[in-house]
Image (cartoon, grey):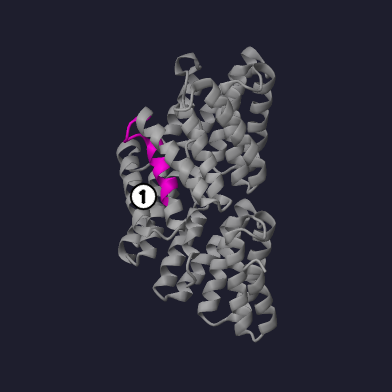
Amino acid sequence: MPRGLLCVFFLWNCLLAPLGALQGQESKPEALREAERLRAKGRYAEALVSAREALAQSEARLGEGHPATAKALNAQGEILLLMSNLVEADPVLSAALEVREKALGADHPDTAESLNAMALLRVEQARYDDAVPLHQRALAIRERAFGPNDEAVAESLSGSAELARYKGKLTEAIELYERSLEIREEELGRDHPDVAESLGGLALVRYQQERYKEAEDLYRRSLAIRRASLGPEHPDVAKSQNNLAAILVALKRYDEAERLLTEARERWLATLGPDHIVIAPVNWGFGSLRSNQGRYDDAQAYFEQSVSIFKRLRGGDHPLYASFLSSLAVTHYDKKQYAEAEPRFRHALAILETKLGPDHPRTRNMMKRLAAVLMHLGRHLDAAALMARSNGL
């Protein structure tokens, strides 16, 4: 199995990341406080009902252009994002930002909150270049408003770190995650759920650098914090289990990895349902495990489920979809089905070239995989040309 394949596990990471500090509770209507309480418990569907109730009440009392209405709009949009409903989240978050910029100004902290949420949405949509200025604006506003060591600044730093990781800028990502972690430990305490989020992000970078033991230690601490602070049924606990399982697969500790994957899948099915996007990565995790165990037919079935679920829920032009396609192609490759592997590798490569660019590490790695297939098919000149491209020649 080609090295680095397991990195796909982490590309969905921002789906369940914290989205905004719960500030000013005393000034919020009861429905909005209830929405935030339910969201913190991971009960997103119930939280959405309360957020919509808060929005309706605010619109009726204060009008559509009031900052309080924008706050309810933003809360609803963030919950929709956590539920992976990007189609509905986009216009809601956009409307909240528009109201806040008009009513409060471009440099208000509430505007920064909306900018941060929009940036996370753009990352989920694989619109990485669009996310960059949004994160930059949010961070600049928060640093001016709160100083360099505030928890809101840490949230922006963490989001910027995640974006840098997606863009293949791992050194920058480490610096941002470490700064975010330092602020959160100082301001919130070492056992706060936001600390677990920063630890998890840093673990993903260490994993991509193949520093597996460091990644494992970071993710075990993240998982312990989430279990203690959020409770065992929270979706973020499942996320930590899922990502730790990928690290354990890389370390060939398959029994514990399978236990964690099973627990994560059961928890997600119970809390998020079978139509949430995270079911695709957990199926991918089982496929990767089976592939490493040499059970290629079982692996292929899991990978096909991941491809099907992701395409139905998110479409077929996302980098994560490319990773699922690549995993399926690798299974064909392992089974010496080179003719079946080629079109899937080509499709994955086309997506990555469009979304990440030809010089991204993931794109170049996909070129190498396709070149290996072409060599087996006897198309040596095509393979040599593709290898040259993968090396920047």
Closer to the camera in the image, 313 or 192: 192
Residue at horizontal 50 percent and vertical 17 percent from the top: 28
Quick check: 199 above or below 253? above
Q: Say whether residue 199 is magenta.
A: yes
Residue 285's spot in the image, x, y percent?
A: 45, 61
Closer to the camera in the image, 161 or 118: 161
**Residue 247 visible in the snapshot:** yes
Residue 279's spot in the image, x, y percent?
A: 49, 54
Q: Say whether residue 334 is magenta.
A: no
Say which residue label 1 marks.
219
Residue at horizontal 64 percent and vertical 60 percent from the top: 359
Q: Does the magenta stretch mainly form a helix, a strand or a loop?
A: helix
Taking the image as shown, residue 209 lies to the left or right of residue 221, namely right
> Looking at the figure, which quarter contains the C terminus?
bottom right
Closer to the camera in the image, 186 or 118: 186
Residue projecting furthest to the bottom: 378
Tag 1: Cα neighbours inside 10 Å, few (<14), some, or many (≥20)? many
Residue 362's spot in the image, x, y percent?
A: 58, 61
Quick check: 82 above or below 20? below
Q: Secondary structure at mark 1?
A: helix
Quick check: 270 above or below 99? below
Residue at horizontal 57 percent and vertical 72 percent from the top: 329
- Say what amino acid the circle numbered 1 marks: Tyr
Q: How many marks?
A: 1
Instruction: Give the residues drawn in magenta, as a range.
Output: 188-203
Residue 163's spot in the image, x, y percent?
A: 56, 45
Closer to the camera in the image, 83 or 49: 83
**Residue 45 visible in the snapshot:** no
Residue at horizontal 38 percent and vertical 41 percent from the top: 196
Taking the image as shown, residue 316 lies to the left or right of residue 294, namely right
